[in-house]
Amino acid sequence: MRKPRKTQKGATYHVVARANRKEFIFRRDFIKDLFLETIHDAHDRYSFRVMNICIMSNHVHLMIKPDNGENISRVMQWILGVFAMRFNRELGLQGHVWYDRFKSKVIESFRQFLATFLYISENPLRAGLVESVDEYKYVGNRIIRDGPTDVMNDVPGVLRLLVPCFGPLSLSPPKAE
């Protein structure tokens, strides 16, 4: 019997979903774009915020916060299930796309939030795919900077202060027109 998933009302989660048989299902950009599109479409059904994301070749990392009344399991089940159907349809395949149920961990402190945020952001760098995180198109800071803007919510201001890749936080008041 599997252990029940730890959930907490109002929590932010680090979610990891791995491809079945460790296959490189995300090796092509149009499949990564399909995953981002699926997250965008999930916003029409569920209320949640994606604070960071990294799409690797055979797995994805999400830093996600369901809004009040939403359930992490329902949100992720929809995202992963709909993506699996779209993936199979796009490539003319059948069968399982995901290895197992997604893994999730409740982020319980600001220190853990920051460590998780950086861990997700630096994943392509640690994997040796790029020499700079800015080179990787499918990671949170690049998505925030270049789009699609409808997948991730604005980066909290404190992260702009602590993580330079998001650009400076404007501390001056807006100019009157």
Image (tube, rainbow, N blue to C red):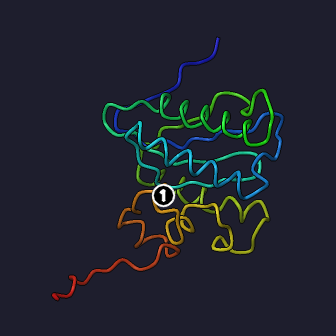
| Quarter where residue 133 is shown | bottom right
| Quarter where residue 84 is shown | top right
Q: Nearer the viewer, residue 85 or 170?
A: 85
Q: Position of residue 102 (x, y in %)?
A: 62, 33
Q: Nearer the viewer, residue 163 or 36?
A: 36
Residue 156, relative to residue 95: is it above or below?
A: below
Q: Nearer the viewer, residue 95 or 144?
A: 95
Tell me the quarter of the image containing the C terminus.
bottom left
Q: Which residue is mark 1?
A: 114
Q: Which residue occupies 74% across, 33% down?
A: 97
Disc 1 marks a residue whose amino acid type is Leu
Tell me the quarter of the image containing the N terminus.
top right
Residue 7, relative to residue 154: is it above or below?
A: above
Q: Position of residue 100 (x, y in %)?
A: 70, 28
Name of the residue lying farthest toward the top: 1
Q: Is residue 43 left or right of residue 29?
A: left
Name of the residue lying farthest toward the left: 176
- Mark 1: few, some, or many residues within 10 Å (few <14, many ≥20)? some
Q: Position of residue 24 (x, y in %)?
A: 81, 47
Q: Which residue occupies 53% across, 32% down?
A: 78
Q: Position of residue 101 (x, y in %)?
A: 64, 28
Element type where label 1 sits in the image: helix
Q: Is residue 53 left or right of residue 167?
A: right
Q: Which residue occupies 24% across, 84% down?
A: 172
Q: Is residue 173 left or right of residue 16?
A: left
Residue 51, relative to residue 1: is it above or below?
A: below
